Image (tube, grey):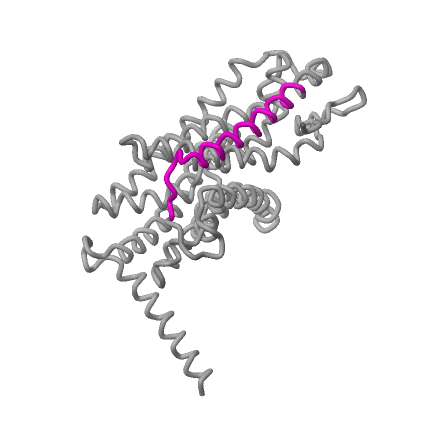
């Protein structure tokens, strides 16, 4: 059993960030994305295969509920919700890791764009796909506020004082038990797969990595852990150094645009060779890495913070941020739709997909020219 360090009497409580720093946080960074991946790739997949519920609906529910949880844990992280017992202190201690590791994996901005393109292609309507994106974003804005209100409702109204130390030891024991339960939950997910609980998304073929359910889930977890770390690294450390004077949360915007674009890599590779669809590595990168690195729930919290955090111009800043994200999402959605049309041209207007087709022809000509020069 893992030994989880518990705060002693000399441990310091950092009021600035409202976070107890312990070595156990390194374990959460791996365990929480793994648990989120099991939830989305095993149990949600089971619900989709065993019912009439479509992936578009399941992803929308995941994104909106993830926004609710992000608003809930944001209050505990910021100190807006004050612990009034060991259980609420546990929420306070794990809040940062829940937002950065679990919810970034549980929700997916890149997935939202891809699903919108699939809906638009199947329904032959650009507006339906665009509507899916807009409704998802607006519902998340409402959900994050409801989550914040719920956190304040169950919290104490007393100011933060050193008396919160009395809850710390019990809170760490609660998190210790929660960590053990998550490990058992992940093991149970693997056992469920081993017994044929879900169908493999890929038929077995002669690949570098054997196409089995265990390998697929293991790679999904690995890429999700790396994606959650990469997304928060770009948003928190790299982007702020570039856009130092921006009043908008450029880190979230850049992450969603960058990893939303990279999330199209699987379908892009399929345009040149359909066998790329069988690659577990490419699928894990496009779906799990880019899904975890894009920050859907964080975008919703950013909008709420802009709306309420600025007495003058808060509504304007929140509106600008929502509009900017919708514009970026629309652009990526349009590219994703063009690719979907090229992959399935039989039931599509011939005029559709022509932009991406022209780009592919240009790249093909450049490749042929480079080959000619090499031969010469």
Indicate whether 51 appears above or below 342: above
Instruction: Specify the principal SS of the magenta part.
Output: helix
Q: Residue at x 62, y 12 (%)?
A: 84
If the image is split into quadrants, where does the C terminus sit? Answer: bottom left
Furthest-front residue in view? Answer: 195
Q: Is residue 324 visible?
A: no
Q: Is 312 in front, or is 292? A: 292
- Residue 236's image quarter? top right
Q: Residue at x 45, y 56 (%)?
A: 207
- Residue 80's image quarter? top right
Furthest-right residue in view? Answer: 10
- Residue 182 painted magenta: yes
Furthest-bottom residue in view? Answer: 376
Indicate whether 109 appears above or below 84: below
Q: Is residue 272 visible?
A: yes
Along the horizontal axis of the image, is 58 left or right of 289? left
Task: Residue 322: give x, y in percent of width and height.
Answer: 41, 38
Along the horizontal axis of the image, is 163 left or right of 225? right
Q: Is 238 in front, or is 53? A: 53
Indicate whether 168 appears above or below 290: above
Task: Residue 223: give x, y in percent of width and height.
Answer: 52, 46
Q: Residue at x 22, y 45 (%)?
A: 125
Q: Is 269 in front, or is 96? A: 269
Indicate whether 97 appears above or below 328: above
- Residue 79's image quarter? top right
- Residue 157 painted magenta: no
Bounds of the magenta span? 173-202
Task: Residue 217: give x, y in percent of width and height.
Answer: 48, 41
If the image is split into quadrants, where does the N terminus sit? Answer: top right
Task: Residue 117: give x, y in percent of width and height.
Answer: 31, 47
Along the horizontal axis of the image, is 114 left or right of 218? left
């Amino acid at each position: 059993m893992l030994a989880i360090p518990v705060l002693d009497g000399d441990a310091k409580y950092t009021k600035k960030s409202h976070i107890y720093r312990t070595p156990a946080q390194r374990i959460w960074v791996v365990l929480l994305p793994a648990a989120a991946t099991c939830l989305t790739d095993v149990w949600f997949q089971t619900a989709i295969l065993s019912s009439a519920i479509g992936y578009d609906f399941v992803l929308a529910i995941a994104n909106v509920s993830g926004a609710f949880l992000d608003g809930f844990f944001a209050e505990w992280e910021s100190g807006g919700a004050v612990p009034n017992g060991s259980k609420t202190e546990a929420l306070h201690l794990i809040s940062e890791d829940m937002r950065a590791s679990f919810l970034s994996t549980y929700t997916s901005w890149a997935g939202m764009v891809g699903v919108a393109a699939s809906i638009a292609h199947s329904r032959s309507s650009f507006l339906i796909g665009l509507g899916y994106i807009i409704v998802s974003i607006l519902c998340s804005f409402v959900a994050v506020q409801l989550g914040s209100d719920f956190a304040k409702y169950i919290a104490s109204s007393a100011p933060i004082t050193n008396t919160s130390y009395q809850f710390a030891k019990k809170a760490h024991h609660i998190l210790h038990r929660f960590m053990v339960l998550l490990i058992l939950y992940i093991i149970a997910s693997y056992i469920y797969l081993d017994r044929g609980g879900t169908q493999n998304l890929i038929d077995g073929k002669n690949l570098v990595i054997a196409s089995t359910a265990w390998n697929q889930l293991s790679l999904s977890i690995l890429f999700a852990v790396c994606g959650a770390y990469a997304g928060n690294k770009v948003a928190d450390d790299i982007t702020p150094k570039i856009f130092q004077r921006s009043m908008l949360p450029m880190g979230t915007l850049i992450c969603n645009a960058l990893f939303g674009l990279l999330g199209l890599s699987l379908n892009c590779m399929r345009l040149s060779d359909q066998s790329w669809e069988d690659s577990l590595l490419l699928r894990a990168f496009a779906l799990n890495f880019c899904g975890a690195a894009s920050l859907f729930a964080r975008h919703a919290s950013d909008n709420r913070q802009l709306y309420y955090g600025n007495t003058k111009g808060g509504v304007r800043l929140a509106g600008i941020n929502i509009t900017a994200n919708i514009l970026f999402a629309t652009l990526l959605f349009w590219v994703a739709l063009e690719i979907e049309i090229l992959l399935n041209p039989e039931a599509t207007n011939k005029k559709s997909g022509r932009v991406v087709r022209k780009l592919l022809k240009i790249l093909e000509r450049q490749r042929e020219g480079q080959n000619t020069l090499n031969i010469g």
